[in-house]
């Protein structure tokens, strides 16, 4: 199923059948609704990530860090840091002479992240919007983002902000759910995402906001690998490329300022 094929909330799945997606959140309500959902699951977010991805999210994040090619002394921003997995891993690489800023709009998620810190390295926790980052121009050597951009209200604005805060030669690295390559895998993944994942997620988190119905729909509405690559290029990045992981269930997109 291609994101661009959705019409009036109806999509064609990998088996050729039609399925109605959940009603899209109105643009002017998305930020508030998404923040309410993530606030409700902040304390169970890491556990659910591990359960629902069968632990694969750890490997995906390690590959994201490798793609960033960080060095000691680098300045890094993690956009939509959530509970801080990428930021915490990055600060261990850049060391005491570097700095990492973990930015997220959701205060409860950042609070969980702060509690995970087990070393006194220079990690800044900042509440901020991916579409209006609280930093001057050209501040960072790398901008990382993991499982964030499909939740923003204006994707183009968030990409423009990532570019704005990067220095010339700075690297943009985005880990995000995408479109599985094989038809069989897409069919299995659709069944898991829309049938099993909401039930497991709700059971573990005791959530009543509908976040685990929203999340698979947000993945389907997000641009596929090639369409997202083109958006990154349109934002002014060069050398834009992507690499599929786990058959395209997720993809890492990279670009350079």
Image (spheres, rainbow, N blue to C red):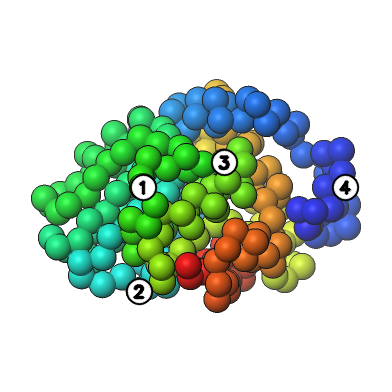
Q: Which numbered marker is on residue 18?
A: 4
Distance (Cα) linking label 1 and label 3: 21 Å
Q: Which residue is mark 1?
A: 136
Q: Which residue is mark 2?
A: 69
The secondary structure type at the circle numbered 1 is loop
Foreground of the two, 36 or 157: 157
Q: Quadrant of the N terminus?
A: bottom right
Q: Earlier in the sequence, mark 3 or mark 2?
A: 2
Where in the figure is residue 246, as x and y percent of width and height? 56, 69
Give the crowd class for mark 2: few <14, some 14-19, many >=20 residues within 10 Å.
few
The secondary structure type at the circle numbered 3 is loop
Q: Earlier in the sequence, mark 4 or mark 1?
A: 4
Q: Earlier in the sequence, mark 4 or mark 3?
A: 4
Distance (Cα) linking label 2 and label 4: 42 Å
Distance (Cα) linking label 4 and label 1: 46 Å
Q: Earlier in the sequence, mark 2 or mark 4?
A: 4
């Amino acid at each position: 199923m291609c994101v661009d094929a959705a019409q009036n909330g109806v999509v064609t799945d990998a088996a050729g059948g039609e399925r109605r997606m959940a009603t899209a959140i109105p643009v002017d309500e998305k930020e508030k609704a998404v923040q309410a959902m993530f606030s409700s699951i902040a304390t169970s977010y890491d556990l659910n990530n591990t359960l629902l991805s069968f632990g694969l999210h750890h490997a995906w994040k390690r590959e994201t860090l490798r793609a960033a090619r960080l060095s000691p002394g680098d300045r890094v921003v993690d956009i939509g840091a959530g509970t801080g997995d990428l930021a915490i891993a990055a600060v261990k690489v850049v060391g005491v002479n570097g700095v990492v800023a973990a930015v997220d709009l959701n205060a409860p998620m950042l609070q969980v992240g702060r509690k995970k810190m087990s070393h006194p390295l220079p990690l800044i926790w900042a509440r901020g919007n991916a579409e209006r980052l609280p930093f001057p121009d050209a501040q960072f050597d790398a901008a990382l983002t993991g499982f964030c951009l499909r939740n923003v209200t204006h994707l183009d604005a968030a990409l423009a902000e990532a570019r704005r805060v990067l220095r010339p030669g700075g690297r943009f690295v985005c880990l995000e759910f995408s479109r599985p390559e094989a038809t069989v895998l897409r069919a299995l993944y659709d069944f898991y995402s829309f049938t099993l994942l909401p039930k497991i997620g709700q059971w573990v988190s005791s959530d009543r906001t509908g976040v685990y119905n929203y999340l698979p729909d947000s993945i389907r509405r997000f641009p596929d690998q090639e369409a997202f690559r083109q958006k990154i290029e349109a934002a002014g990045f060069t050398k834009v490329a992507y690499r599929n992981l786990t058959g395209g269930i997720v993809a890492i997109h990279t670009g350079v300022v």
